[in-house]
Image (cartoon, helix red, strand yellow):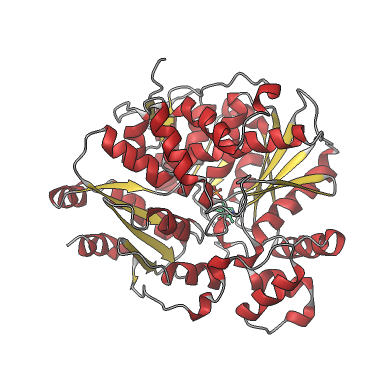
Amino acid sequence: MNQLMYKSTRGSAKTVTASNAILKGIAEDGGLYVPDNIPTIDFNIDELVKLDYKALAYLVMSKFFTDFTEEELKSCIDKAYDSKFATEEITPVKKIGDSYLLELYFGPTLAFKDVALSILPHLLKTSVKKQGIDKNILILTATSGDTGKAALEGFTNVDGTEIIVFYPVEGVSTVQKLQMVTHKGKNTHVVAIKGNFDDAQTAVKNVFTDNSIQESLAEKGYLFSSANSINIGRLIPQVVYYFYSYISLYKKGEISKDDKINVVVPTGNFGNILAGYLAKNMGLPIDKLICASNENKVLYDFITTGTYDKNREFFITNSPSMDIIVSSNLERLLYFVSGKDSNKINELMTSLKVNGKYEITEDMKKQLSDFYGGYASEEETTDEIKALYDNYKEIIDTHTAVAYSVYNKYKKETKDATKTVILSTASPYKFPNAVMNVIDKKYFGLDEFKLINEMDKLSAYKIPQSIKDIDKKEVIHTKVCKKNEINQVVLDFIK
Ligand SMILES: *Cc1c(COP(=O)(O)O)cnc(C)c1O
């Protein structure tokens, strides 16, 4: 079989194999790695229904990670998708009214990030071995709330790795913060950055392309990589559950052969929905990719106008993992819709850096027709939580509620009756305040930990073990830094 190679969206970094792209995380020219071409799957649904999650994961990932042997890849998959997920299905689908919830939060940290971050450490370790590299890996990760804990969980005590997570002081929920600052594991570090997620992400990205810090690290025997969705090893495992959801609907008789489905994705950094775009281009019958934003609606504006403009007010919302103005993975989509034109990508990214905005060509806009952009205000989000509870006794988290709200707007506007899968990206137990206070006013004023216990009484799912008594755990990580101090923080850790 021909090897699938990876290129940088910005065109001047070397073309590399999958394992090399996973190791590097981001290309030297500042671009993101993309496969030379998007592989396709012979979409035979009657064959696909025979596969369980792991077998499906192998089928999808083997198309992308072609330099891994079957044994290597299967071993990574087995280690990732085991009993750390609360269900053997890994990502089950549940019918609610006329739509379907793809529940992605049964992993150890209660958000969809676990699906990719439980396999990434194994992909990385295998890549190190394959490349014959005799170095430790230093993982740097910026988090808007959920990636941090999921990455810590994935990398804890994986030998040959150290991980530093940077989270913004402004924004993350109490439960999210506690999950990180109480995390144990001798190779794990957590630092608060003064600022918001975009500040944290930009600071981390700059470390990756800073030659002097790269050299100091190399001297100490370290190599950088990233656990953010800029890493292709993070992105590809997310393609799997799009296939899984389609197969589930087919198995349950909810769709027939060759039917198309729509998907609604609560979006921040554009990683999850980009995985959906890859799934569609591999041959999965997806019609619309519905991109749902909260009040930070830069993607909605982009999809509807073709202009991306980050010069705007930043809102802290009750769906903090989507409080993002600079969506990294959009660069990958731009690359594909420009016909793989690196010059164009450089031009757009320079414009973003210099002017804070860019406008795509008419041709590129046409290529975006698979996407529909929508957004939900804070009030619409909480209304949706209340409506789902009142109508179906279903408790959803704030991010999923953003998606639901956009789904309802989409239906109203287009009258499209295509069966639709809504990606449920986090457990409501992570956001007890925002969720319980709208379900019933009587909860108002109770602290978050009491609310978790109250939620347990209403929910079909019991309090997950991982957050039980989290308020009583010892806080281990207390470091706070400014965004321009991050290089020094990194150097201090590896001393
Ligand atoms: C990270 C996250 C998102 C956004 O996903 P992207 O891949 O960054 O677009 C949405 N919901 C939750 C709960 C998340 O943790």
Q: Residue 170's spot in the image, x, y percent?
A: 49, 70
Towards the viewer: 455 or 431: 455
Q: Position of residue 133 (x, y in %)?
A: 21, 38
Q: Position of residue 307 (x, y in %)?
A: 57, 41
Where the C terminus falls, by quadrant?
Answer: bottom left
In the rendered image, which quarter contains the N terminus? top left
Nearer to the camera, 164 or 160: 160
- Residue in view at x 50 percent, y 62 percent: 145
Residue shown at 31% from the left, 33% from the top: 20
Q: Residue furthest top?
A: 1
Between residue 51 and residue 129, name the one nearer to us: 51
- The answer to whether 409 appears left or right of 241 in the picture is right
Q: Is residue 173 visible?
A: no
Q: Residue 295: tell me if it is visible.
A: yes
In the visual, does 207 lie left or right of 150?
left
From this view, report whether residue 392 is shown above or below residue 80.
Answer: below
Residue 349 in which image quadrant: top left
Taking depth in this image into account, of 106 and 36 the one nearest to the observer is 106
Q: Give x and y (percent) for residue 439.
A: 78, 71
Query: Residue at coordinates 80% horizontally, 45% vertically from top-left?
Result: 99
Number of labels in the image equals 0
Spot the residue most to the bottom. 445
